[in-house]
Amino acid sequence: ELKVEQNPLFLSMQEGKNYTIYCNYSTTSDRLYWYRQDPGKSLESLFVLLSNGAVKQEGRLMASLDTKARLSTLHITAAVHDLSATYFCAVDFASGTYKSIFGTGTRLKVLA
Amino acid sequence: GAGVSQTPSNKVTEKGKYVELRCDPISGHTALYWYRQSLGQGPEFLIYFQGTGAADDSGLPNDRFFAVRPEGSVSTLKIQRTERGDSAVYLCASSSQSAANSPLHFGNGTRLTVT
């Protein structure tokens, strides 16, 4: 069964702190994505990770991929209020066709 | 440039009625996806088109759901005999799979409420 799991589901953190969101998936994949969703809005692409050991950084967010462990992390450095949103990882499982399976999401709230 | 456009943005219908949801993808994107998102959940895959054909419809929950993309651009998701459990936000996304790193570009969704 194709499963993508994220933890934590909810995260409340103080501004200026660091934290990591984890994304585990159940079977082989060669493409993993991170998306951001603000309340009432649609999803916005943040990162695309295409190979083992890939690392991408944008501002205070850094994403990495370990395909052997079937694990991706999204690290938040010195959080600010504007990062408050729900973050989803999504994995493409190449079973004849590419379709992205999404995790349950991590709802992040950064407290001022 | 223009993004993925979905209409209507909101749809309220009575149980048992038929609804159509429309998606206009980014021009030139060959891949088109439909997802369904319930409150507090991640998007749930429904169907994926490559060009005009449905490459993967394994996510459609039952035969009340059907989608078409007759000319390889605009797509319509059709739901027959709607049920209250169909209430959700229906998201459409497109991507250019000619690029190796092609994330999904999502529309703003159609919020369907079945009363």
Image (cartoon, coloured by chain):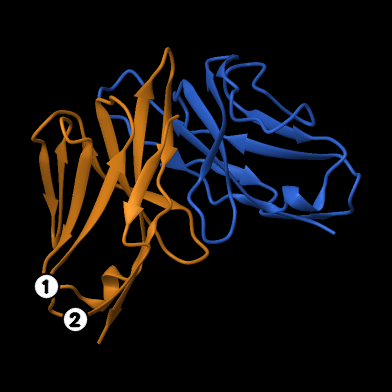
Chain colours: A orange, B blue
Question: Of helix, strand and loop, which one carries label 1?
Answer: loop
| Quadrant placement of the N terminus of chain B | top left
The image shows residue B76 at horizontal and vertical percentages of: 69, 31
- Tell me the residue that label 2 is attached to: A15
- Can you tell which quarter of the image residue A65 is in? top left
Horizontally, residue B24 falls left or right of residue A49, namely right
Is A13 placed left or right of B58 in the picture? left
> Alpha carbon of mark 2 to alpha carbon of mark 1: how far?
7 Å
Q: Is residue A35 above or below residue A107?
A: above
Whether marks 2 and 1 lie on the same chain:
yes
Q: SS of the residue at dot 2?
A: loop
Res B95 quadrant in image: top left
Letter of the chain that mark 2 sits on in the rendering:
A
Which label number is shown at residue A78? 1
Marks 2 and 1 in Cβ contact (< 8 Å): yes
Q: Residue at x 61, y 36 (%)?
A: B23
Is B15 displayed left or right of A82 in the figure?
Answer: right
Image spot of residue B47 (x, y percent): 58, 27
Q: Where on the picture, by quarter, is residue A25?
A: top left
Q: Chain of mark 1?
A: A
